Amino acid sequence: MIRKTGAYLIVWISAVFFLQPPQARAQLILGQYEEEAPFGTWNTFAPARASSIGRGGTCFTLAADSSASLSNPALLLLLPRLTVMVNGSADYASFFKYSLVNTGVLGSNGNLSQTLYALDYSGISLHLGKWAYALTVSINELYNRPSAYAAYSAQETVLYSLSLTQTGILRSFNLSAAHSFNDWLSAGLGINFSVGDLERKMVEQWTQTGISITDRKTRDLKEFNLNGGLLVNLEDRVRLAAVFRAPCSRQSKNHSFLEYVAPAGPTDIQIEASSVDKVRQPLVLGLGASYKLLPNLWAALDLSYYNWSRYSVDYFGEDLERDFRDVLKVGAGLELQSFFRIFGQRIDFPVRLGLVYDPQPMRNPRSSYASFTVGGGIAWQNFKLDFGALVGREYGSGNNLAAGKFSMSLTFQL
């Protein structure tokens, strides 16, 4: 009887902390790494691929492949008749405060880091006269966190352990069309359907007694939104663009499972809960400009406004606190088009440089990433190989977080 009372007490404490996250976390604002926060940065509109990463993420007025459909579909009209592209990437980020880590339960001696590898994009585009079309599949957000593990040992025997893992992905399918009205004005519209999932799992174990507590939460995500843009081409030297991503509600089907197992009882107590909630995604507006400084040198600037103050999250019927502010992300870059000849064959090799200022939406602490980018490529006949790299550092939180990305793409074009 005492064992069962104790068991219920343990389950009750865990249930209060884990099954009711809004109340338990009311005094704790993680900001940069809330559970639903994307890996690296909150600002994920028009996720950059290899060519655009190299020039500071600029992608509103310059296009190298079908991924333009995710930023400004009007750019599809600048591409050849047919392009097919695949892209792979390695994303790096460091973490300090997230979930149970450095929030009063688990502590670390410094920042934790993680690198994720993915084939994150494939797409095809078709340019027919005054019309252009694209169909793409991409990974736009990842939700992974470094795994955490803590243990208490005596005489080289583990008596108690706690482990924490979180994984997740948001995959988007985009269908875009663009039309050229005349020599200087074109417009495009994209339809996006996204699906994904997020899982967080915590396991506590007492080795000698066999007692364990498992807390598992999952989210199944669905989202439908629109993106589009205008492109103005002035005398083939100046390009201006205006783009948008419409606000939308991301559906989140949530499920919570808590289990307490005590073999000596034997006791197996399970508590489950489920809900269908909404994550209201913000409006994004962008302006872009590029200028041909030399016949083979472009300079580009992109400004992206995120209406994060309208962002909100419902979770098991509760409105989670997200005290966010609107932010303006800035990307600037240069692209130099060079070539050489081998046995009469022309080989093109672009060189790219850029800078990115990426403020995060939290009001407290205010933080931003400043990044340097570099990229290049090689193109021969119908094939292009591009790469881009980003190295960034976060300022404002006092944790000196780092971010990095390396991306490579292969394009076939006719």
Image: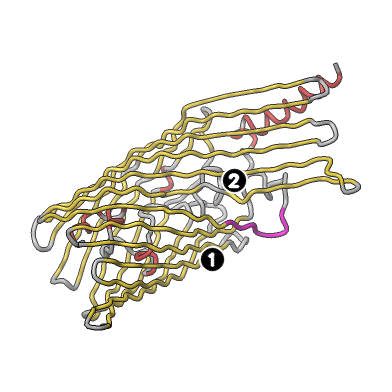
Q: Residue furthest top?
A: 1
Residue under label 2, please give it.
29
Whether the magenta-drawn stretch holds residue 199 is answered as no
Quadrant of the rendered structure where residue 193 is?
Answer: top left
Which circle, 1 or 2, is nearer the viewer? 1
The correct choice, above or below, for 121 with respect to 63 in the image is above
Q: Position of residue 41 (x, y in %)?
A: 48, 55
- Amino acid at pointer 2: Ile
Instruction: Look at the image and give the residue range highlighted in magenta.
Output: 108-114
Q: Residue furthest right?
A: 155
At numbered mark 1, what does the secondary structure look like: helix, strand or loop?
strand
The structure residue drawn at horizontal position 16% and vertical position 56%, both measured from the top left corner, is 127
Quadrant placement of the N terminus: top right
User: Which disc is residue 357 wearing?
Assistant: none
Q: Position of residue 72 (x, y in %)?
A: 26, 55
Q: Which residue is mark 1?
A: 393
